[in-house]
Image (cartoon, rainbow, N blue to C red):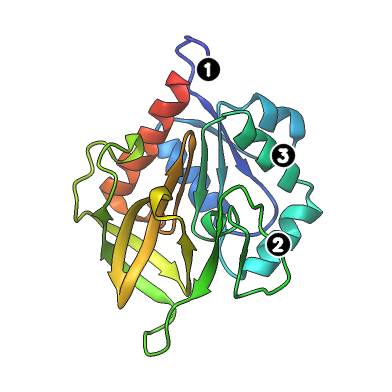
Amino acid sequence: MNGSDEPPLIAVLDYGIGNLRSAQKGFERAGADVRLTADPALIADAAGVVLPGVGHFGACMRELRAAKLDGLAISAIDSGTPFLGICVGMQMLFEGSEEAPGIEGLGVLPGMSRCLPDGLTRPQMQWNQLDIRLPGCPLLQGIEDGAWMYFVHSYAVDTDPDLVVATCEYGIDVTAMVGKASLWATQFHPEKSGERGRRLAQNFLQQVTSS
């Protein structure tokens, strides 16, 4: 990112499925120049990249690959471009999901998405509180432990505890947010989480402009 006064360019990966417009508007409210795009040149030039996702893991991965965005996402992450996965977009960063056996995720983080246990209402579709495990995470600056975020999901990531930034309680400890270097992902929807979600988006833009 250069030192100009222009807003940072954020590429929201457009693979025809997911909460694309909602994510776009969320980052526009935070002050970014947001493009829904599948253009390799624009994605490579972006100061930050967002991978949203809703619905079925397998459908999302198939459409991402059909749009030839899987390799571009991995390249952006490998290059150190600030990257944020949202909801199923978070799950797609891992190796796979019980929701779609045999369909590989992007595999940039170790772990699997597993179905929420029997006896729980699925999906979890509600506001829930964050239990912040990594208080120094730059995307959570100004967001207090116990902050309410909005969740809609039936599967939860099972991963290395060292990657877990925050959890929420829903019968079990659910992985609510992960992070590694300049890669972050949330199971909750920042763009639907009011002021706290807007603050997280602003924090992501701060990382984009300082990278």
Q: Which element is circle 2 on?
A: loop
Label 3: few (<14), some or many (≥20) within 10 Å? Answer: some
Residue in view at x 43 percent, y 81 percent? 122
Dots 3, 2 in contact, CB < 8 A = no
Residue 16: image quadrant is bottom right
What amino acid does circle 1 point to?
Met
Q: Where does residue 68 sit, x and y in percent of width and height?
A: 79, 47
What amino acid does circle 2 point to?
Glu
Q: Which residue is mark 2?
A: 104
What amino acid does circle 3 point to?
Leu
Sooner in the amino-acid sequence: mark 3 or mark 2: 3
Quick one: 113 or 50, which is closer to the camera? 113
Sooner in the amino-acid sequence: mark 2 or mark 1: 1
Q: Which residue is mark 3?
A: 72
Q: Is residue 136 left or right of residue 63?
A: left
Q: Which element is circle 1 on?
A: loop
